[in-house]
Image (cartoon, rainbow, N blue to C red):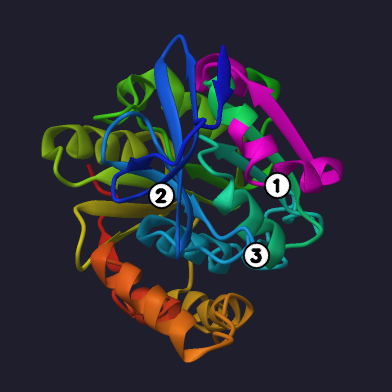
Amino acid sequence: MAGRAPRFPTWRYGKRLLWRGYDEWGVVEVVEGHLGRGMHFGSASLQGRINRDLPWLPVAEYAISMSLAAAFPAPISRTQNKSVLPISSVPQICLLGLGTGSLTWTYHHLMPKAQLTVIELRPAVIEVAQTLFGLEQLSSQLKLIQGDALEKLSLVPTASQTLVAIDLFTANNMADCLLEPKFWRELARILHPFGVLCINTWGSRPEACSKIQAFIQQYICPAGDLYLLDHLSFTNEILFACPHPVDLADVLKRSSVVESKLHRPKHTSPRQKKRWDKEAEAAGLSSESIGQRAQRLQYVTTKL
């Protein structure tokens, strides 16, 4: 596996190509635009985007919505069941799928004490994240595991994870492991009873999405709550699953805290703002705030 920058200025997907590499799963490309650096797997489908100046600021639709997951777990569990440990004051976060590392940065910014575990299949993606996206800066709080998520989940302790975030895609589809019952049984094992699992899915694959939702209802939250958030300009759907029922009013209150922490600073010049707005419009990036997204959460019954 090797990657390098092109010798001469090269354009891909309407942006400048910074790096192209290969591994056994195919090509990985990094392009630069006004919104930040984007990752592609040899097709126009965006696999992630990160602002190198503000890496904690989500600049892709799915990443903005998945940041809302931080509003679900209560800081201290109110359970009366003495056999269930309260959520740790040091959050444990497991991310399946690294991408640009944008979500890793975002969750670190929202929960600075959190210990982060990331499982990523592709060596080329890891190389890019460490060399072009600054992920090495989080090394003291980050455990990075290279390998198949279905196999490597066994390394994660039982009932330990405050938040599990899943963003597993190939160049043209969702990862096959998402349709494996064993995968969901492992996720149910590692998730804390008062934690939250969120997953990015493609609504354009309705049959696969229905199966994923059924697995979530069966294994993750048969007695808890499941919420869906769709997007105004994309077919992506984000699911938030909680093994224990949550107080949505509390989630909405905490979403305002998430929004305040992820507030985008003002641009330094009108020209910079114009460029940002133009590219954001072309990319279909919504102006909808995190709080507004939280208001649109749709409850999905967990009765099978």
Residue hosting label 3: 53
Identify the element where label 2 is drawn: loop
Give the mark count: 3
Residue hosting label 1: 134
Residue sitting nearer the eye, 130 or 153:
130
- The numbered mark, 3 or 1, whose residue comes first in the sequence reads 3
Residue 64, image x and y in percent?
44, 64
Main structural element of the magenta stretch: helix, strand or loop? helix
Residue hosting label 2: 223
Identify the element where label 3 is drawn: loop
Residue 64 lies left or right of residue 267; in this view the side is: left
Q: Is residue 138 above or below residue 143?
A: below
Residue 147, image x and y in percent?
58, 16
Residue 67, image x and y in percent?
51, 62
Residue 245 makes an appearance in the image: no
User: What type is the residue that disc 1 sits on?
Assistant: Gly
Please report the residue visible at 38 percent of the width from the left and 82 percent of the height from the top: 274
Residue sitting nearer the eye, 90 or 44:
44
Residue 94 lies left or right of residue 277; in this view the side is: right
- The numbered mark, 2 or 3, whose residue comes first in the sequence reads 3
Residue 234 lies left or right of residue 105; in this view the side is: left
| Residue span colored magenta | 128-153
